[in-house]
Image (cartoon, helix red, strand yellow):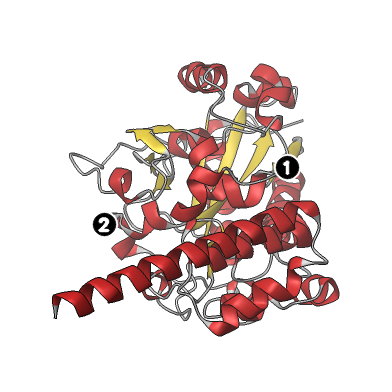
Amino acid sequence: MPITSPANLIALRAELALRATQLGFTGFGVSGIELAEDERHLLRWLEQRRHGEMGYMQRHGTRRARPAELEPGTLRVISLRMDYWPGAAADAQQTLQQPARAYVSRYALGRDYHKVLRGGLRRLANHLREASGGQQRVFVDSAPVLEKALARNAGLGWIGKHTNLIAREAGSWFFLGEIYTDVALPIDARASAHCGSCSACLPACPTGAIVAPWQLDATRCISYLTIELKGAIPVQFRPLLGNRIYGCDDCQLVCPWNKFAQAAAHPDFKVRQGLDAATLVELFGWSEAEFAERLAGSAIHRIGYQRWLRNIAVALGNAPRTPDILAALQARRAAATPLVREHIEWALGRQADNAGTAGSAERTSRAGG
């Protein structure tokens, strides 16, 4: 039988929080399961079709906002945070300002976070089971869970205007995981919001995906376009991607709360394969076997080789015109799949347009001189 004594539940919560720290988590909180306000927000978002091709956001209906429907008997949700900011990585802003280099979202520079978090969550859940006799289930993006709303209710942070969770003491560079349980642990106070009048994240979005404070149109988001979208990237967005080949961090990079971000302690989140400073030409040259080998165990691996090439082709089209870039695009042109070839042709056309513009500017300059 689960523990029911208030004193024992308080002691168990404290014990779990300590154990979570020992397992590498940097935030721990407990919430109830009431998410009616967030469910209404979710349903409005889905009605507006802002989820694009992410059918899984709609597939499970209201279960995403009703923990007890997803896991019968759930009374509490334990939310946990683990920092991932790669402190030793090349400067993100500088990489974005070097268009011949590839920009990869900071969370994906190391190993796939799912296994790291899931292992820690399972160990913590097992400890809770042994101590209480209760039932638990762990989640890391593995089921329909409103993780940011639950973490906010557990006191781990507030949902910022860019729709990411922000913690006063850690910014927003962290992963979240959850444990659903039937043990009635003491509930933490919901976190208060501290964005105030700041709206730096809205104009920072390259594609205008943050259409209003706390409103994200995922179909415009670079993370969606480079990761979730399976087909061709809409032409109107391609120039706006710049050199971002996997995900986007711009809204977080400008957030003033990230001055408090903590560097990742877990070794799996360290940069692998030089992805923080690689050139577009170098990555575009990888064979499918090299892609599979070098990105095994990486979150990037899930998009597959063709979308990887698709994304890099767009970035090459946005890069300065050089012999190396033109040669890289031409080398893949003939043997490319229809999806990749379309983006290569676009990139070559854009390179030609850029050359014409540069030539026109040079002639104008000479005439004026």
Image quadrant for the C terminus?
bottom left
Q: Where residue 258 sits: x, y (%)?
A: 33, 60
| Residue at 17% over, 39% down | 197
Q: CA distance from mark 1 to mark 2?
A: 31 Å
Horizontal side of residue 302 vs 255, given as left or right: right
In which quadrant of the rendered view does residue 138 lie?
top right
Q: Where residue 286 sits: x, y (%)?
A: 74, 77
Q: Dot 1 corresponds to which residue?
A: 142
Please identify the residue farthest to the front as the structure is shown: 367
Image quadrant for the N terminus?
top right
Q: Dot 2 corresponds to which residue?
A: 256
Q: How dense is the environment of label 1, judged by Cα within 10 Å: few (below 14), some, or many (20 and up)?
A: few
The residue lying toward the viewer, choosing from 285 and 327, is: 327
The residue lying toward the viewer, choosing from 246 and 42, is: 246
| Residue at 69% over, 73% down | 330
Number of numbered tags placed on the structure image:
2
Task: Tell me the SS state at disc 2.
Answer: helix
Q: Where residue 253 sits: x, y (%)?
A: 36, 60
Amino acid identity at mark 1: Ser
Which of pointers 1 and 2 lies earlier in the amino acid sequence? 1
Q: Where residue 11 sits: x, y (%)?
A: 54, 45
Q: Is residue 105 visible?
A: no
Q: Is residue 347 visible?
A: yes
Amino acid identity at mark 2: Pro
Horizontal side of residue 297 vs 267, given as left or right: right
The residue lying toward the viewer, choosing from 331 and 234, is: 331
| Residue at 55% over, 56% down | 247
Asked if the residue under mark 2 is in contact with the one under mark 1, i.e. CB atoms within 8 Å, the reply is no
Q: How dense is the environment of label 2, judged by Cα within 10 Å: few (below 14), some, or many (20 and up)?
A: few
The residue lying toward the viewer, choosing from 266 and 123, is: 266
Relative height, residue 34 to residue 209 (above, below): above
